[in-house]
Image (tube, helix red, strand yellow):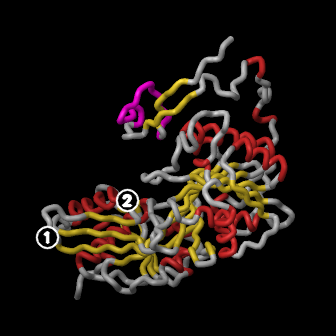
Amino acid sequence: MTPKPPRTLFICQNCGFQTGKWLGKCPECEAWNSLVEEVVSPEPPYRRTPDQVAVRSRPTPLISLSPSQEERRPCGCREFDRALGGGVVPGSVVLLGGDPGIGKSTLMLQVLDRLSGGGFIGLYISGEESAGQLKLRADRLGITSARLLVATETCLENILKLLDSEKPHYLVLDSIQTLYAASLPAAPGSITQVRETAFQLVQLAKRSGIPIFLIGHVTKEGAIAGPKLLEHMVDTVLYFEGDRSHTYRLLRTVKNRFGPGQELGVFEMRQTGLAEVTNPSALFLSERSLEAPGSVVVASIEGSRPILVEVQALVTPSSLGMPRRQAAGVDAGRLSLLVAVLEKRVGLAFGNQDIFVNVAGGIRLTEPAVDLGIIAALTSSLWERPVAADTLIFGEVGLTGEVRTVAQTEVRLQEGAKLGFRRALLAKGQRNQLRSVRDLQILEISSVREALRRLFPPDR
């Protein structure tokens, strides 16, 4: 039987939608200019008939199974181990994404250098940098491990041959978008190549037990480039975040099959590489202005870690017909909602005011527990009255102006007491849940109006 010739299709690089003609807008995900022409083989080389596929396992009653023993290998970098849930799991596939130049390659070189100790072999394969460039970076980072091997390769078949010959214990691929399988006619970085190479690498990790770290590019929207299926295939997804104008870098866990999600590791970028930050709260608050209008300290939970950060607000009269609302580090939609609550429930006037809100240090807060801190900062700037520097604020604010309780209150208060705070403003009804917090004066409130009365008492 004569094999069918390959055909040309236009494939959306965001969602994988296929069509026989070019379209300016993808009808599936509605992305513009995302369809790329690719040559598609009618039958993938790995396709098997039902008779050729072996049965992997037989159905077994769940209660009769014994749990697998999860063996973790700490890499020696506590912040990286925290993001992974305690260490590297054999056979796991970790996807690391981040903006260009944020420090992804630097982080993985440092991690692989530590993992290569104790008789283990680490292999770093780069598809974007030459061996000379990697050597210059290694000298700057002070990498000294003799068992850290590097290679420059983009062909998946050649990479598999390197693994057979070198037999490494850890593998880093930089990046998944530069790899290609020679059996596919599509270009490197296309949705077909990313999907195929990731599938084969995941199968390799499960068969051999080698932990594989994949570095991925991100789009201008901040998502990892390639099909969303890539994030579903891997075991752990990490995002390396941070503003390049700041020295702080945040390693955030988005997905983790072997540990808790939404964990956070904090690093500081230095000339010699990335340094761990063991006490991020003290670092973020080290340069805050005391007794300054518009500045408050909020307690946020990132994964299992409490972090105290400074929220700053600037409210100033506007000369524009439509006042500006700008937010950095918090959601702009949430800011508009809290401004509406202050106008409707408290009677404050922001209609002719420009509003700017910023989280110091470049960190991004997504937890609703920072609502009360944002409201306090806005009111402080509007009234030109500072909040006491020893006051810690957290609580979720509802549309009716009520202040709701948040989880892990005791952990937040313990972090505040450790850093010298003396008062805490939180929702009513949580005092009975506190056992080991004795150094803080607890101010319980039930509404936004009551919170503002406590923070800004009337002048006598």
Residue placed at 32% from the left, 61% from the top?
335
Q: Quadrant of residue 337?
A: bottom left
Q: Which amino acid lies under the numbered mark 2 shown in the image of this protein?
A: Asp
- Mark 2 is surrounded, within 10 Å at the Cα level, by few (under 14), some (14 to 19) or many (20 or more) other residues, namely some
The reply to whether the magenta stretch includes residue 22 is: yes
The reply to whether the magenta stretch includes residue 377 is: no
Q: Name the front one of labels 2 and 1.
A: 1
Left or right: residue 379 compared with residue 281: left
Q: Which mark is residue 46?
A: none
In the rendering, at what x and y percent does residue 2 appear?
66, 13
Residue placed at 42% from the left, 59% from the top?
368
Residue 167's place in the image compared with 21, above or below, is below
Residue 207's place in the image compared with 87, above or below, is above
Q: Which residue is mark 1?
A: 319
In the rendering, at what x and y percent does residue 82 appear?
65, 63
- Mark 1 is surrounded, within 10 Å at the Cα level, by few (under 14), some (14 to 19) or many (20 or more) other residues, namely few
Residue range in magenta is: 14-29
Q: Quadrant of residue 253?
A: bottom right
In the rendering, at what x and y percent does residue 141 appear?
67, 74
Q: Nearer the viewer, residue 314 or 24?
A: 24
In the rendering, at what x and y percent does residue 225 appear?
51, 47
Which circle's residue, 2 or 1, is located before the other in the chain? 1
**SS under mark 2:** loop
Which image quarter holds the N terminus?
A: top right
Residue placed at 78% from the left, 49% from the top?
162
Q: Which amino acid lies under the numbered mark 1 shown in the image of this protein?
A: Ser
Q: Nearer the viewer, residue 380 or 28?
A: 28
Q: CA–CA distance between discs 2 and 1?
A: 24 Å
Left or right: residue 82 compared with residue 428: right
